Image (spheres, grey):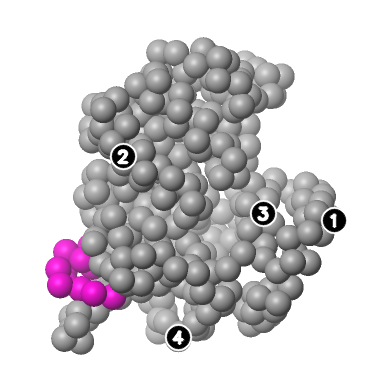
């Protein structure tokens, strides 16, 4: 049985719709009983309600579940409680986080998960399935790589949940991996020009994306940077945040920004998602200077999240769930991303 926790959120609803399109009958769950009940009854599905901080209620909610697909963020506040109950219930755990601290926290529970015989697979959405698979593919092409750069250009808007997580991280430093360790760097630390496949070079700037954590576990490459294509005004704002950190982290600023987020639409419309696309690029470099480069193209980030998360959940439901902490490519191989409708990969000849 698949249980989707956080089913009433913007991305949770997309995941529920994808699960139904795949012929699944998931159990819906979340903290707001009224909202979950209304959603489930409209779809003819079973539902359960439990707050994330109520261990007894969570245990009852997950009873009988083979896989939980955890969609309630910000995950920095929810991953530990959900993984606790999964370990107790011996339920496979998947989530759609993009937060480095969550990946690292779940990686530290690898031995517990193996002892319980369950899989812990965070980042089952846009972050990090496509980029993780791209990283593993590049490592396969260049096994002696010592440096890895990943970049993406996500066309389309952001959901309220994504914006809330961004607000929580305002004023925090950036992050890269050096010699196998995650180290802090200034926001917008480095910018480089990247061709995402349309023949145009675009500026892309470093961000503390989830692959700074996960790509190391997937590839063993010790030096990792992740970039995103952003508008100059956004880059300037990121640079300014280096000095405005205390202000951005203040309670009054965060409350104002959270209120602004709550007044926005839940996320991109169906038309906007259909028009959008995800463009990813990666480069692995060996000490000799030899390079391997590749690109991915897929549907919008939210569409890709729903398709990828449900696809991996189905694999786990079918018994294909290696125990312990996993990344998408470690669990299912670098080519699992190509099983997602609308995704293509292009290799640039090695140099």
- The disc, 1 or 3, on the residue closer to the chain's N-terminal end is 3
Q: Residue shown at 51%/74% (left/top)?
A: 185
140 is higher (above) or lower (below) than 163: below
The residue where tag 4 is placed is 193
Query: Which quadrant of the view contains residue 287?
Result: bottom left
Q: Which residue is mark 3?
A: 168
Tell me how far mark 4 sits from mark 2, CA to CA: 37 Å
Residue 110 circle label:
2
Magenta segment range?
Answer: 137-147
* Residue 282 vertical placement versus 316 (above, below): below
> Which residue occupies 41% across, 50% down?
104
Q: Could you give the CA–CA distance between mark 4 and mark 1, rounded to whole angstroms?
A: 37 Å
Res. 342 in view:
no
Determine the CA span between mark 3 and mark 2: 27 Å
Dividing the picture into quarters, in which one does residue 116 lie? top left
Mark 3–mark 4 Cα distance, whole angstroms, equals 29 Å
Of tags 4 and 1, which is closer to the observer? Answer: 1
Estimate the x, y position of residue 108 in percent, counting from the top left. 36, 44
Q: Regarding mark 3 in the picture, which secondary structure is present there?
A: helix
Q: Is residue 88 left or right of residue 207?
A: left
Query: Is residue 274 depicted above or below 315 in this figure?
Result: below
Callout 1–callout 2 Cβ contact below 8 Å: no
Q: Nearer the viewer, residue 258 or 187?
A: 187
Give the mark nearest the N terminus, 1 or 2. 2
The x and y percentages for residue 249 are 73, 60
Q: Nearer the viewer, residue 2 or 302?
A: 2
Image: 330 above or below 310: below
The CA distance from mark 1 to mark 3 is: 13 Å
Q: Earlier in the sequence, mark 3 or mark 2?
A: 2
Tags 4 and 1 touching, CB below 8 Å: no
Query: Helix, strand, or loop for circle 4?
Result: strand
Please tell me which of labels 4 and 2 falls first in the chain: 2
């Amino acid at each position: 049985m698949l249980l989707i926790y956080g089913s009433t959120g913007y991305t949770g609803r997309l995941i529920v719709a994808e699960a139904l399109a795949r012929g699944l009958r998931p159990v819906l769950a979340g903290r707001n009983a009224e909202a979950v009940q209304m959603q489930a009854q409209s779809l003819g599905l079973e539902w359960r309600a439990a707050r994330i901080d109520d261990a007894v209620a969570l245990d009852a909610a997950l009873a009988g579940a083979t896989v939980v697909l955890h969609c309630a963020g910000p995950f920095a506040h929810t991953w530990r409680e959900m993984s606790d109950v999964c370990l107790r219930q011996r339920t496979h755990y998947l989530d759609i986080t993009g937060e480095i601290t969550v990946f690292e926290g779940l990686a530290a529970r690898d031995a517990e998960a193996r002892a319980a015989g369950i899989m812990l697979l965070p980042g089952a959405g846009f972050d990090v399935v496509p980029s993780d698979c791209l990283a593993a593919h590049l490592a396969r092409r260049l096994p002696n790589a010592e440096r890895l750069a990943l970049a993406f250009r996500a066309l389309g808007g952001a959901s309220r949940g994504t914006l809330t997580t961004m607000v929580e991280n305002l004023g925090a430093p950036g992050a890269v991996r050096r010699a196998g360790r995650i180290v802090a760097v200034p926001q917008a630390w480095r910018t480089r020009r990247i061709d995402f496949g349309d023949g145009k070079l675009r500026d892309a700037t470093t961000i503390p994306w989830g692959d700074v954590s996960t790509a190391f576990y997937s590839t063993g490459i010790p030096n990792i940077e992740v970039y995103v294509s952003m508008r100059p005004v956004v880059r300037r704002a990121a640079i300014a945040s280096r000095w405005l950190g205390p202000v951005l982290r203040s309670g009054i600023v965060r409350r104002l920004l959270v209120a602004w987020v709550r007044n926005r639409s839940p996320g991109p419309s169906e038309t906007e998602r259909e028009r959008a696309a995800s463009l990813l690029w990666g480069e692995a470099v060996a000490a000799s200077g030899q390079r391997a480069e590749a690109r991915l193209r897929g549907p919008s980030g939210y569409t890709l999240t729903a398709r990828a998360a449900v696809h991996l959940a189905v694999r786990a439901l079918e018994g294909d769930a290696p125990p312990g902490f996993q990344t998408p490519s470690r669990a299912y191989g670098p080519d699992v991303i190509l099983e997602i409708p609308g995704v293509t990969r292009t290799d640039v000849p090695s140099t």
